[in-house]
Amino acid sequence: MRLQIFQEFSPVIKVATEKIIDAETYVSSIHSNIRMSLQLLDDVLPIKERANEFSRRHQEATYSLIKLIGLFEKYEVVSPQLDIFKLAIGVAKHDMTIAGVRLCAFLIRILPMDIITPDGVSQVANVIRPTEEQLHELDELVGNYEKATTIDIIGYLYDLNVEMQNIFLSKLFNNKVPRRQPLDPRIKVVSTEPEEMEKLRKYFEEETDWGKSGTV
């Protein structure tokens, strides 16, 4: 049964990781291509990325996390300590959702968009040159999205994979996987050690935007 549970979680973790990386990579390409085009050209912003494509990738990443949270709820009776991951990923998903909505609304304003004219011809509209103020806003919005995705969620998914192996496979193989040890002490590592779980729960419920909002 332990092996079956691990095998059910493993592909869901893998897909969630891939979808998060895909969305964040697309955001990074938007950011770098805008900056590069402004350095090379003086008139327009001829990049290929689109706000609706980012929205699609962001939604797929969100759905992959929802599916993972559903698995936590399904097997809560088997391994209740995994509830800390349900909390951690739920908080990070909250941050990613807010960052994604704000970023998408901004990208609609500054990115080109493809439209179909009444006679069926495809045209590119909204080709503008961002102002310095818009570029600073873009930097902040992209930074917030990258924080929520690559630093928080991807880290938590890595931690989850480690804990899943240690909880469900370690007795089968008489071995354990070492936990993540980030150089930045501000980065949270999620584990199922009782003392660490207590600290993490306090952090997520009292110090994050999600906790302060009264969602808990």
Image (cartoon, grey):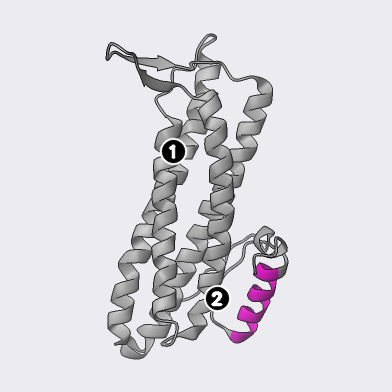
Q: Position of residue 212 (x, y in %)?
A: 72, 62
Report the Cα–Cα distance between label 1 and label 2: 30 Å
Q: Quadrant of the N terminus?
A: bottom left
In reply to whether residue 197 is colored magenta, the answer given is yes
The answer to which of 182 and 209 lies nearer the viewer is 209
Q: Position of residue 83 (x, y in %)?
A: 52, 78
Where does label 2 land, which residue?
84
Q: Position of residue 184 (x, y in %)?
A: 64, 60
Q: Is residue 4 above or below residue 51?
A: below
Q: Is residue 170 above or below residue 89?
A: below
In reply to whether residue 186 is colored magenta, the answer given is no
| Disc assigned to residue 160 | none
Q: Residue at x 43, y 62 (%)?
A: 66
Query: What residue type is disc 2 on?
Result: Ile
Could you tell me what secondary structure mostly forms the magenta stretch? Answer: helix
**Which residue extends farthest top?**
43
Q: Neighbour class for label 2 at 10 Å: few (<14), some, many (≥20)?
A: many
The answer to which of 68 and 24 lies nearer the viewer is 68
Query: Which range is magenta?
Result: 194-205
Q: Is residue 94 toward the left or the right of residue 114 in the image?
A: right
Q: Position of residue 37 (x, y in %)?
A: 50, 19
Q: Is residue 23 toward the left or the right of residue 195 in the image?
A: left
Query: What residue type is disc 1 on?
Result: Phe
Disc with the residue nearer the chain's start (1 vs 2)? 1
Where does label 1 land, which residue?
54
